[in-house]
Amino acid sequence: MSDGSAIEWTHATWNPVRGCTKVSPGCKHCYAETFSERFRGVPGHPFEQGFDLRLVPESLGLPLRWGRGRLIFVNSMSDLFHEGIPAEYITRVMAVIRSAPQHQFQILTKRVERLADYAHCHEIPSNAWVGASVENSAYTWRIDLLREVQARVRFLSIEPLLGPVGQVDLQGIHWVIVGGESGHHARPMDAAWVREIREQCVAAGVPFFFKQWGGKRKSRTGRVLDGRTWDEMPLGVAIPGDD
């Protein structure tokens, strides 16, 4: 687990799984893969096996040791609903979440089909937010599957935004994050694509969070959109650290 995350919409990260495989265009320049592969073969390093998928059961109890509430991004270096992760292990992760009500856990996946299947048979803890990644209009079908999941907070991470998403149905969606790709090979993001999503969120009353413009030097491009930052969070949920 890492406290003080640089990710703008969370406080900490927790990785009971490490590694993943690519499933759609948003994965092309995966930051987690780039980071992990730097340490492949380094004896004793957490990423000695690079970005190969592996369970990390020794990390399961870490959130229980944190008394002060945090927003915790689950599997920033993986995808909890990867097909290689046994359902029984996902259930163990959910049990830890349920046992740590002082935290709000943010679970983001591109494998929304498996999330929906899992949620049909298992109750999602009330302090678990479930989200779907959507990078362009070709993947808006993930939103419809996410809507099937019974969860207190359902959210979208439209990052990296690689093209216009068009008109989307935001019914049952509680939060939308938008951001551009960052890094040396960052693909461009058009401001019109961002504004199209923001205006739909405003019209639907869905909180909107603009994470970054991205690019090779995201610290220079910043995260101001039309003269302001957009840091809205899900309504009706007590956000740890806001009191």
Image (cartoon, rainbow, N blue to C red):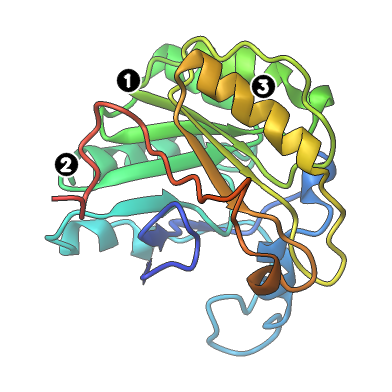
- Earlier sequence position, callout 1 versus callout 3: 1
Q: Residue at x 75, y 55 (%)?
A: 181
Which residue is labeled 1 in the image? 123
Q: Secondary structure at mark 2?
A: loop
Tell me the kind of residue under disc 2: Pro
Residue 77 is tagged as none
Q: Position of residue 104 (x, y in %)?
A: 28, 43
Is residue 231 toward the left or the right of residue 45 in the image? left
Q: Residue at x 87, y 66 (%)?
A: 185
- Earlier sequence position, callout 2 versus callout 3: 2
Q: Position of residue 228 (x, y in %)?
A: 52, 50
Rate crowding at label 2 as few (under 14), some (14 to 19) or many (20 or more) other CA atoms within 10 Å.
Answer: some
Which residue is labeled 3 in the image? 142
Tell me the kind of residue under disc 3: Arg
Tell me the kind of residue under disc 1: Glu
Give the number of the mark in front: 2 or 1: 2
Distance of label 1 from label 3 (alpha carbons): 20 Å
Q: Is residue 149 above or below residue 63?
A: above
Residue toward you, 235 or 92: 235
